[in-house]
Amino acid sequence: MNMTDFVIKLASPRGFCAGVDRAIEIVERALQKHGAPVYVRHEVVHNRFVVDDLRSKGAIFVEELDEVPDGATLIFSAHGVSQKVQKEANTLGLKVFDATCPLVTKVHSEVARYGREGKTVVLVGHEGHPEVEGTMGRAVGPVFLVETLSDVAGLELTSDMPLAYVTQTTLSVDDTARIVEALRRRFPGIEGPRQNDICYATQNRQDSVRELAQICDVVLVVGSHNSSNSNRLRELAEEVGARAYLIDGVDDIVIDWLAGARQIGITAGASAPEVLVRGVLDHLESMGGRLEGADKMVEEGVAFALPTELRDDFEVTVR
């Protein structure tokens, strides 16, 4: 297909968030300090390119701790783990570095606090996602998972029970707001966190892709298919009215997707590196597209501290 004279627009912000930056840096510095292999429970972030790169440097990804040799170095992924997994790692005498995103840790703290206060917790999230499994594993009392409005209607709880809710950090902002509204209608006394549990990066990337999809015929979302926040970006772009596709990288692009498009947008999930975006941009430019608008990334001004043992001298944060 011969395509010429179409416009390319880049979403901003896009790509890596502070939690992902921190998690990858923890694995790389652990490899430098302790040598290969370093074991990582679950994919440290949900991106095939990142995982393959770390694997080539000596990281070994496992699902269960019985795959980790005694005394080895273990890293918990950015999605967090249950209290049971944490205790098991301590029992096995493993050298543990926790790469859990601090915003996920905040949700863990909320779940535990509500349980200690005697409240039953409703967790809004996707069943089977490692962040949800880790969060449910931090509960010290009853916890119920809801994914949809119909799940809220089906909850076998009563409005006179002490209740609280928390949410997974990478959900659709709009969908979650509707579910929380339904929870508050059905259970007027339900408590919630003082601040939204959906992380700043998820919110910002959804805002930017919404703007992009309003002006673009096609939106390409760079991110792996097991990435929750990347899937939400594709869904949101489609809801706004663009044809939207989730791709791991340039090799996944199907030319027929772009047929008739005069404006094509590119964004990336919070676990997708900028090098993949650049590959897609270069490919579209080689097809006759021209980049329009600012190429600079919006600075989000967020950074999270590394574990003390992995910091350089005088270093406070990783950016």
Image: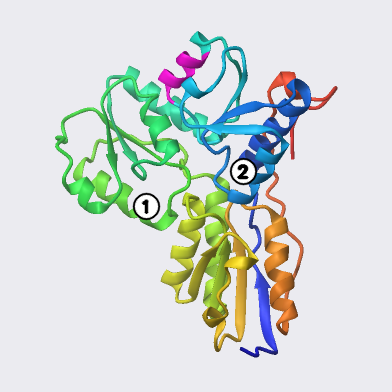
Task: Please count the marks in the image.
Answer: 2
Residue displayed at 55% across by 65% down: 209
Asked if the stretch drawn in magenta spans residue 113, the answer is no
Residue displayed at 43% across by 50% down: 171
Most extreme residue toward the right is 313
- Find disc 2 in the rendering and name its residue: 51
Q: Is residue 302 visible?
A: no
Instruction: Classify residue 68 by image quadrant.
Output: top right
Say which mark, if any, is on residue 177.
Answer: 1
Left or right side of 103 for 26: right
Which element carries disc 1, helix, strand or loop? helix
The image shows residue 95, relative to residue 187, as above or below, that is above
Give the extent of the magenta segment. Answer: 82-89
Asked if the residue at tag 2 contacts the one at tag 1, i.e. Cβ–Cβ closer than 8 Å, the answer is no
Which element carries disc 2, helix, strand or loop? helix
Viewer-side residue, 24 vs 199? 24
The image shows residue 55, relative to residue 228, as above or below, that is above
Q: Is residue 8 visible?
A: yes
Mark positioned earlier in the residue sequence (1 or 2): 2
Mark 1 burial class by Cα count in 10 Å: few <14, some 14-19, many 20+? few
Amino acid type at image mark 2: Val
Instruction: Please name the predominant secondary structure of the magenta segment in the image.
Output: helix
Viewer-side residue, 281 vs 105? 281
